[in-house]
Amino acid sequence: MDLDDRKLKILQAIIKNYLETGEPVGSRTISKYTDLNLSSATIRNEMADLEELGYIVQPHTSAGRIPTDKGYRLYVDTMMQEKVDEVNNMRDDLLEKADRMENLLQQVAKLLAANTNYATMVTTPKYRSRKIKFIQLTDVDEYQVLAVIVLEGNIVKNRMFRSDVALVKEEVLKLNLALNTFLQGLDIEEINIGLVQKLKSQVGAYQELVSEILDAIATAIQEEGDIRVYTSGATNILKYPELSDMNKARDILSTLENKEELTQFVDGGDIKPDEKRGIQVYIGDETKVDSMKDCSVVTATYEIEEGIYGKVGIIGPKRMDYERVVGTLQNMMGQLDDIFKNNKP
Amino acid sequence: MDLDDRKLKILQAIIKNYLETGEPVGSRTISKYTDLNLSSATIRNEMADLEELGYIVQPHTSAGRIPTDKGYRLYVDTMMQEKVDEVNNMRDDLLEKADRMENLLQQVAKLLAANTNYATMVTTPKYRSRKIKFIQLTDVDEYQVLAVIVLEGNIVKNRMFRSDVALVKEEVLKLNLALNTFLQGLDIEEINIGLVQKLKSQVGAYQELVSEILDAIATAIQEEGDIRVYTSGATNILKYPELSDMNKARDILSTLENKEELTQFVDGGDIKPDEKRGIQVYIGDETKVDSMKDCSVVTATYEIEEGIYGKVGIIGPKRMDYERVVGTLQNMMGQLDDIFKNNKP
DNA sequence: GTTAGCACTCTTTAAAGTTGAGTGCTAATA
DNA sequence: TATTAGCACTCAACTTTAAAGAGTGCTAAC
């Protein structure tokens, strides 16, 4: 038995209907509301076949059918066509508050959540290289010095340090120079103990301070390597009865709150910022997150520049409106592209 | 009829029991588990009085009593004695990750949530003055310049700017000097158009850049004036059946996610970092937040230095363990004091 | 003033019955 | 051979009824 055209049409009708209503779909409904002109009995026969093939199931004997993960998968891969999201240009909303990367991403999460009624996540971009561009020391007052660390890609970090001994401007300048001579262009792995010793031997005073600064640089770079995740609209999850079971809801919301498990979506899927913008759909268990086995996650990839990219994700019930979600994501990715190309935050 | 000693004892017993079990407390329970040696009938009479006085109510005719807000209030004000929280020293946990203020506060929220099983919030400190300490411009490359803005209280902000014309090192230095001469020590309100014009007339080139930088300074200061709120353990709310009603839960979690409504706790209560550390208890409607009418919020005040303070809050069901919560908060505030005094992040 | 005792109330839980949607199968039909 | 009408059957969901249990208020006795 194979999946002929009629079976496909029926399956599609079932899934579409289920996406809308969230209720099991019966044979009568399909018979009435499609242009197939078949009696419910015929539909029933076909449905039995589709069930045998694993695309749909009955929650219980006397209920209609609902799609299985396999069914959703087929739908997503071959049957849906994304709706073009003609929703108002989000670009202005985005830029308004987006004076910094962090804010921008947070804003993206927020906007998507508001527009889709699902939960959303946005990861910070993943940088390949984490080389030191330069370091700038400034004496803030007699005992405090501010270190501004600029990494490749213009990531700026600053730390304040307190010295036990009074600082002399000239010495701070010298230290600054030494730091740059030694560290400029280096990656974190390249800063080894030998180098540190050599550096220390060069700067007469402030041994203590140098150690602290080096530590700070190390953690700053490390930190930047960490992927952070912003989420929004977590409570939207509670709008869907099938996820509102107290235990399920708690688990999902915890996952969203803790965020660790969400980082794994970063490496999934292809990075191809082409037409499809690296859109990836994870259905149920495909998320590989236990608490999300009743959810689907749709991710898209944004790229800041060649090789530096992050993910945007929509988290909702399995019966989410894939067509709209994909459309909205593509729209958003387009706008992000615009911003990154012309108007770097 | 007034509240004699025996009534007080009975009320206290009822509340304590209810805090533990969450179930309405019957007369028999009180009769058995207190050292009052009174029969359940006597307790019943007293309970009827306590109900008339407004301290307890029956959820329905044939149920035990539960405390009213007025009852909780009396308990919190006069009957409870905070438990000393001998929970392991949190200081090390705190400092481990606390290389920056932001992280520290986030960590505080997290630790408290883990220790109390309630939701928590921590606000960023509220600064009185927002004066500019100094500005440091650095040319990153031919077309980009990094501005580091240091505000009083050593708050550091940085912004990257892109210039349309190629930058000359000397000119950038001159601009830097001019900016500092004009702006050092000024509050945001003091930067008026006249000043801006004057400043612009001084710097030959880079008119465009100056505008951008001034804008950035303005928003940076503004931003720092905004109070941000970190929350943690929001899902703990779902552990309490009386809050797990889908609608209530959604409302509460939304409030926690949106955070705006939480800022209002900042101004509540006295700021007295004495023994009590400005601890304030809001019961039910006292929170002034509609979605939290079934919750209680306990806040404490931390102070970084004279006049610069923020709030830490615990959000739980009305029957939260006030004694422990207050103890834990006092402990935490003590540790924060320690950190802020000796080891500024 | 305190208490034993009892009738009464009201929630909670379980069991039993009812309804309705939807199925699977069979036999007739095109 | 594919389709369909028809019907018996299943099972969740809802309603009704009954029973149990917790707890009260009141009265009368101590």
Image (cartoon, coloured by chain):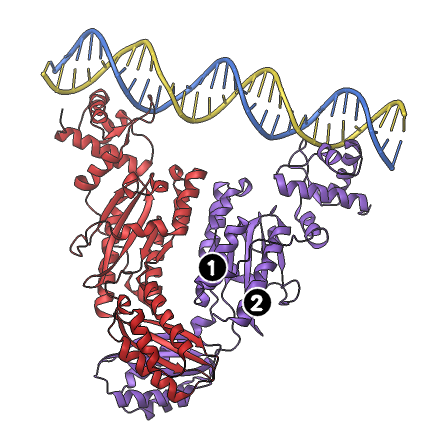
Chain colours: A red, B purple, C blue, D yellow
The foreground one among A314 and A128 is A128
**The N terminus of chain A appears in which quarter of the rendering?**
top left
Residue C23 in picture, x, y percent from top left: 28, 20
Query: In the image, is residue B161 above or below residue A63?
Result: below
Q: Chain of mark 1?
A: B
| Residue B316 falls left or right of residue A180 | right
| Residue B64 falls left or right of residue A305 | right
Mark 2 Cα shell of 10 Å, populated few (<14), some (14-19), many (≥20): some
Q: Tag on residue A344?
A: none
Judged from the image, the secondary structure of the residue bearing numbered disc 2 is helix
What's the amino acid at mark 1? Gln
Residue B246 in picture, x, y percent from top left: 47, 41
| Residue B257 falls left or right of residue B142 | right
For the point 33% across and 39% down, the residue is: A293
Whether residue A272 is visible here, answered yes or no, is yes
Query: In the image, is residue A219 above or below residue D30?
Result: below
Whether residue B229 is visible here, answered yes or no, is no
What's the amino acid at mark 2? Asp
Tell me, yes or no, whether the two marked residues, 2 and 1, touch with CB atoms within 8 Å. Answer: no
Judged from the image, the secondary structure of the residue bearing numbered disc 1 is helix
For the point 48% across and 51% down, the residue is: B233
Mark 1 Cα shell of 10 Å, populated few (<14), some (14-19), many (≥20): many
In the picture of the structure, the residue carrying the numbered disc 2 is B337
In the picture of the structure, the residue carrying the numbered disc 1 is B107
Question: Mark 2 or mark 1, which has the lower sequence index?
Answer: 1
Query: In the image, is residue A130 above or below residue B80?
Result: below
Residue A90 in picture, x, y percent from top left: 29, 60
The foreground one among A19 and A233 is A233
